[in-house]
Image (spheres, grey):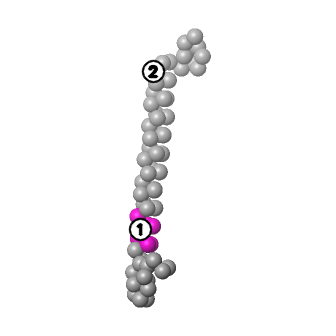
């Protein structure tokens, strides 16, 4: 049975839909990775600030 009979769309339209779905999946994955990179940077900045505060108080960062 052809795609036109089963789904009511042509092979070209089915390929286009699959392409767009894959494009959206890749975009979502990329956005997630960017978010994780930003989160990692924020954590590194926070840890750096904690270490600076600990040094300013005469404490070792490991003691916190």
Magenta stretch encompasses residue 45? yes
Q: Position of residue 26 (x, y in %)?
A: 44, 41
Residue at (41% x, 64% y) in the render:
41
Mark 2 against mark 1, which lies toward the viewer?
Answer: 1
Q: Secondary structure at mark 2?
A: helix
Q: Quadrant of residue 38?
A: bottom left
* Precedes in sequence: disc 2 or disc 1: 2
Local secondary structure at mark 1? helix
Residue farthest toward the right in the current orientation of the protein: 6
Q: Residue 5's mark?
A: none
The 10 Å Cα crowd at callout 2, few under 14, some 14 to 19, many 20 or more, is few
Distance from disc 2 to disc 1, alpha carbons, whole Å, reads: 48 Å
Tell me where residue 63 appears, x and y as whole percent: 48, 80
**Residue indicated by mark 1:** 44
Residue 57 on image: x %, y %? 43, 89
- Residue where numbered disc 2 is placed: 12
Q: Answer above or below: position of 44 versus 34.
A: below
Q: Is residue 53 visible?
A: no
Categorize mark 1 by other alpha carbons within 10 Å: few (<14), some (14-19), many (20+).
Answer: few
Residue 11 shown in magenta: no
Q: Quadrant of the N terminus?
A: top right
Q: Judge by depth and name the residue closer to the eye, 42 or 19.
A: 42
Do residues under tags 2 and 1 come within 8 Å of each other at their CB atoms?
no
Report the span colored magenta: 41-47
In the rendered image, is residue 26 in sight?
yes
Q: Is residue 7 left or right of residue 40?
A: right
Q: Residue at x 44, y 51 (%)?
A: 33
User: Magenta: predominant secondary structure element?
Assistant: helix
Between 14 and 48, the one lying in front of the other is: 48
């Amino acid at each position: 049975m052809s795609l036109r009979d089963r789904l009511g769309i042509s092979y070209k339209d089915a390929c286009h839909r699959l392409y767009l779905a894959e494009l959206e999946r890749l975009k979502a994955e990329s956005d997630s990775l960017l978010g994780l990179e930003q989160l990692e940077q924020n954590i590194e900045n926070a840890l750096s600030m904690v270490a600076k505060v600990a040094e300013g108080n005469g404490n070792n960062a490991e003691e916190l």
